[in-house]
Amino acid sequence: MLIATGKIWESAMKLRRYAGNPILRCRGDEWESVAVFNCAAIQKDDGIHVLYRAVGDYVHYASRLGYAVFDRNLNLLERSQEPIFSPDIGFWEMSTEDPRLVEIEGGVYMTYVITPTPSAPGAVRRRLGIPKPQCAAPRTAIARVPRFWEFERLGIITPYNAEERNVVLFPKKIGEKYAVIHRPSNWIGPNFPVDRPSIWFAWLDSLPGMMHGHKVIMKPEQLWEAKKIGAGPPPIETDMGWLLIYHGVNSDNIYRAGAALLDLEEPWRVIARTSEPILEPEEDYEREGDVPNVVFPEGAVVMDDKLVVFYGAADKVCCAASISLSKFVYHLLREERI
Ligand code: BMA
């Protein structure tokens, strides 16, 4: 009986990998020759448009963004030969990383991380003997995306004193205001309500605008997310609440994915949350790469009842996994696992 119920939970809640994973690998000998990972996704005009982080050399480790289009069955239709978005030094961008795409009031927006002092991840630096540089804090900016090859930079939206990588916009206003989920990783300790990097809510009066009214949504709870948690793709609206897929990192730096359901009107209220991961590094392409043992979701599209999640694996390749959205939410609400 116990095993049967566990199996039901597993089949409803564990994301199933796309058989054609990885959907994108690095290629060529230039801007995307070293790694392509952490992909945003949005469905439009019957194509799934994907922006991904691309790295062309380990020494500078400056990221640009590449662009690909897939059909509903995740067949690759198109892939840009050139980067679609590159750091602009006029905006103090040395590296543009980890895009997230969202459609709000008919317009497409992208949040992306600006790293003023990019450097290869620790695992790569140790392997190649690259010294640890002095790092300035990453911040997150927003751009309007009128077409997938055109970007209008709107500026940084994270608070000036916050180190921020995982910022997602809600796809619609809540009440009268825009809203975001963010993860100020240095807002921890005695002056804050959390002791480890946690997931926060904030309002935005305009796009762009200053974040205000910060509230903690959730903190690390389980061992698999004990070190830090951060939002994945922008929240997905369902009848039962906002579905938030997030990543959790444990003390061994293993990145896994979990999910939570947030109240539709007061999204800082958590209705349900998985106590176990819904995706974790298991396949070779998730366990071995530039940073081993990483699954890092950043994109999600819903087609009929199918939720497809796009994620980076081992900071090396882009992948996808899916699940029935209605079953997922049903079981998330009940956490039927005993
Ligand atoms: C985070 C970001 C991501 C990366 C992850 C795992 O801090 O740098 O881009 O995928 O670490 O290395």
Image: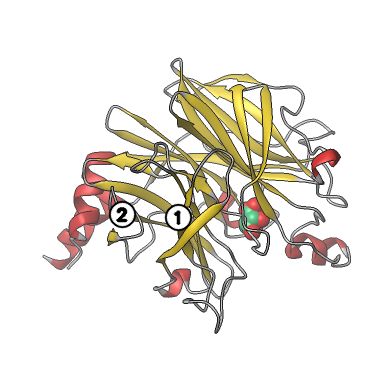
Please tell me which of labels 1 and 2 falls first in the chain: 1
Q: Amino acid at mark 1?
A: Tyr
Q: Residue 260 is drawn in which quadrant?
A: bottom left
Per the rendering, the mark at residue 246 is 1
Q: Position of residue 275 (x, y in %)?
A: 32, 66
Instruction: Specify the farthest residue to the left.
Output: 1
Number of numbered discs on residues: 2
Instruction: Specify the farthest residue to the bottom.
Output: 190
- The quarter of the image holding the C terminus is bottom left
Q: Secondary structure at mark 2?
A: loop
Is residue 246 or residue 147 the one in the foreground?
Answer: 147
Q: Position of residue 318 (x, y in %)?
A: 58, 40
Is residue 6 or residue 154 the one in the foreground?
Answer: 154
Residue under label 2, please give it: 266
Q: Position of residue 169 (x, y in %)?
A: 48, 43
Q: Position of residue 330 (x, y in %)?
A: 19, 49
Q: Amino acid at mark 2?
A: Glu
Q: Residues within 10 Å of mark 1 (few under 14, many from 20)?
A: many
- The quarter of the image holding the N terminus is bottom left
Instruction: Specify the farthest residue to the top.
Output: 45
Q: Residue 291 is drawn in which quadrant?
A: bottom right
Say left or right for 165 vs 226.
right
Colouring chosen for the image of the structure:
secondary structure
Residue at left offset 71%, top offset 57%: 138
Q: Secondary structure at mark 1?
A: strand
In front: mark 1 or mark 2? 2
